[in-house]
Image (cartoon, rainbow, N blue to C red):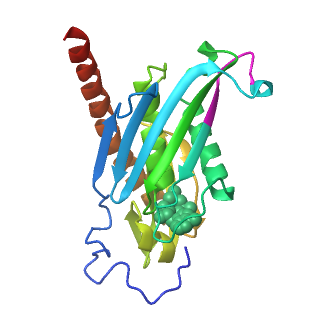
Amino acid sequence: MSGHTNMTLVNENGIRVDGRAFNQHRPFKVNAGVLKNADGSAYVEIGKNKILAAVYGPRECHPRHLQNPNKAIIQCKYNMQAFSVSDRKRPGPDRRSIEISKIIAEALENVVLTELYPRTSIDVYIEVLQANAGTRCAGLTAAAVALADAGIPMKDIVSACAAGKADDVVILDLNKEEDNYGQADVPVAIIPSTDEIVLLQMDGNMTREEFDNAIKMAIGSCHELYDLQKEALKKRYEEKEEDESS
Ligand code: ADP
């Protein structure tokens, strides 16, 4: 997010580096139940982002001192594979992945009925296989589907998409160049049935009016993702029924 570059991110016709219009998101793909051995799983592509999420639980909480007698805790591990970015990423947790894990767990706590499973842990693993900006949103979107696939009671799922600003234009769903050289990046996650915002961050600067526009576009995109998330879960459910009847 430098905001200082000679690179044109939005040209005079309003077209972005990858050919999109200001209000166009990248292609979305959502699959549920892609891993056999996890309790629940999902695979999400947002443009060039490729992300797997797996869920275990509710299960006994380790380490034990984290147990909550009143509800389950959600433990999230967001991890970027070494081969997920153009230069090899040093494996293992870093400040960024710890922060992203925390905000994703907090967003999910708004929908999971944790009070039904006191003293347990619901473990969410997010593996970034390929990254191109927007991985926290794609990871959260995948994690929500994986939780539902695991059959964990939730009041709704969570859908997430970013918006931002580049070359003084408010744009939807920033890619890597726009994230690196643009002026602002605003990841947003909502509970689609109520439009309640459960994650909101901002890197860079925008005016109040630009911010309102960015939020509006991001929420619109979340609703499109929501339809795909529900479709993926429905498909998975139908497959399960077929498996059981054969
Ligand atoms: P998000 O992926 O949610 O947009 P950031 O804004 O922190 O989160 O990162 C933007 C993008 O920068 C990532 O999606 C990834 O493509 C790239 N990136 C992040 N961390 C690294 C890293 N350690 N090495 C190389 N590229 C990285």
Q: Residue furthest top?
A: 245
Residue at position x 39%, y 33% in the image: 35
Q: Which is more toward the observer, 145 or 23?
A: 145
Residue at position x 35%, y 30% in the image: 33
Q: Position of residue 165 (x, y in %)?
A: 45, 70
The answer to whether residue 69 is magenta is yes
Q: Is residue 156 visible?
A: no
Quarter of the figure with residue 17:
bottom left
Total numbered labels placed on residues in the image: 0
55 displayed left or right of 97? left
Q: Position of residue 20 (x, y in %)?
A: 27, 68
21 displayed left or right of 152? left
What is the magenta range?
67-75
Q: Which is more toward the observer, 90 or 111?
A: 90
Q: Which quadrant, please, contains the C terminus? A: top left
Q: Residue furthest bottom?
A: 6
Query: Principal SS element in the magenta part?
Result: loop
Q: Which is more toward the observer, 151 or 7?
A: 151
Q: Which quadrant, please, contains the N terminus? A: bottom right
Q: Position of residue 231 (x, y in %)?
A: 26, 32
Residue at position x 21%, y 9% in the image: 245
Q: Is residue 139 visible?
A: yes
**Relative height, residue 25 to residue 139 (above, below):** below
